[in-house]
Amino acid sequence: MGRYMFKRIGQAVVVLLLVSIFAYLLTYMIPGDPVYAMLGGDITQEQYDIAYEAMHLDQPIVLRYFHWLMNFVTGNWGDSYRYSQPVAALLGARLPVTMYLGIWSIIISTIIGIILGVLCGTHRGKLLDSILITCANFGAVMPAFWLAVLGMYIFALKLGILPTHGFVLPTENLAESVRTTVLPLIALSVGSIGGTTRQMRSGMLDVIRQDYIRTARSKGLTERAVTWKHAFRNAVLPVVTLTGMSFRNIVAGAISIEQIFAIGGMGSLMINSILSKDVAVVQACIMLTAIVVTISNLVVDIAYGVIDPRIRVE
């Protein structure tokens, strides 16, 4: 298991280095002079010279990359030209909002999706299976932004029981936090619930026909024991991968949802920074997203080895 983990960690480090190279090269992918692209063309020569030196454009590109990488590793992520403050402070204010919504969305969609998928798999062809899989298919193809607008129209504009915009963390006001979180979480979770349900159902149908399941039943085990102690462990493997892929939302956020509900999270910050060519912020967002996705994939790989010992043996 140690060799298996060491191999996966080495692959994760290589991936992060490659992503850092592409993130840094964003400065040179902007059309025209990088300084004018970020600050505009109406700056003075003195302002241009200060920015040119601050961006280390007078040094070879390899040295500039390593200088930027060392700064990023030590927490010096530069300053935002659009917001006139350090990038680390800017992300520190936005990240908790996106993480809160992302983590709750993953928890809700994974738990509900697994339960519904197991019910579908153990009741194949019955009325319950038909109803649940129809709802799951409908939810999986439903755009999140459409759900957000529909929920806002029904619960905010028509019924008036939920706010149309804004977000409050539970540490500030628990009741208001629940009210401002309901609609975004529904919009974020419905599609994932549908996908997880379908994946779990497929896994259960594949596993439940295996010989060891028939052997377990022949030993007189209850159907609940067969389902949760024997079939579930192997059927849940694809869902683990699906859940790991969802972890990018913890950092990147859902841009459409944050824009619709005017939530000051990472998604809205990233799109605004891209439109304003605030490269330092975009680079930091890309790197944070890459780190979270890489770590989540690493955890998924290790979880595979723990759940199914055959994988680490191979």
Image (cartoon, grey):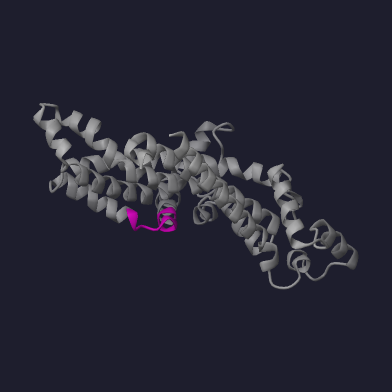
Q: Residue furthest right?
A: 46
Classify residue 7 as left or right of residue 96: left
Residue 301 in the image: state x and y as whole percent. Answer: 42, 42
Task: Give the main secondary structure of the magenta stretch.
Answer: helix
Classify residue 167 as left or right of residue 90: left
Classify residue 58 as left or right of residue 175: right
Q: Nearer the viewer, residue 203 or 313?
A: 313
Quarter holding the C terminus? Answer: top left
Which residue does the image show at 53% across and 52% down from the upper left? 258
Q: Quadrant of residue 37?
A: bottom right
Q: Quadrant of residue 214?
A: top left
| Residue 180 is at least partly visible in this image | no
Residue 189 in the image: state x and y as whole percent. Answer: 40, 47
Classify residue 98 as left or right of residue 277: left
Q: Nearer the viewer, residue 141 or 230?
A: 230
Q: Which residues are magenta?
A: 140-148
| Residue 137 is at least partly visible in this image | yes
Q: Nearer the viewer, residue 59 or 228?
A: 59
Which residue does the image show at 33% across and 54% down from the upper left? 140
Residue 261 in the image: state x and y as whole percent. Answer: 52, 51
Q: Nearer the viewer, residue 62 or 50?
A: 62
Which residue does the image show at 20% across and 46% down from the upper left? 205
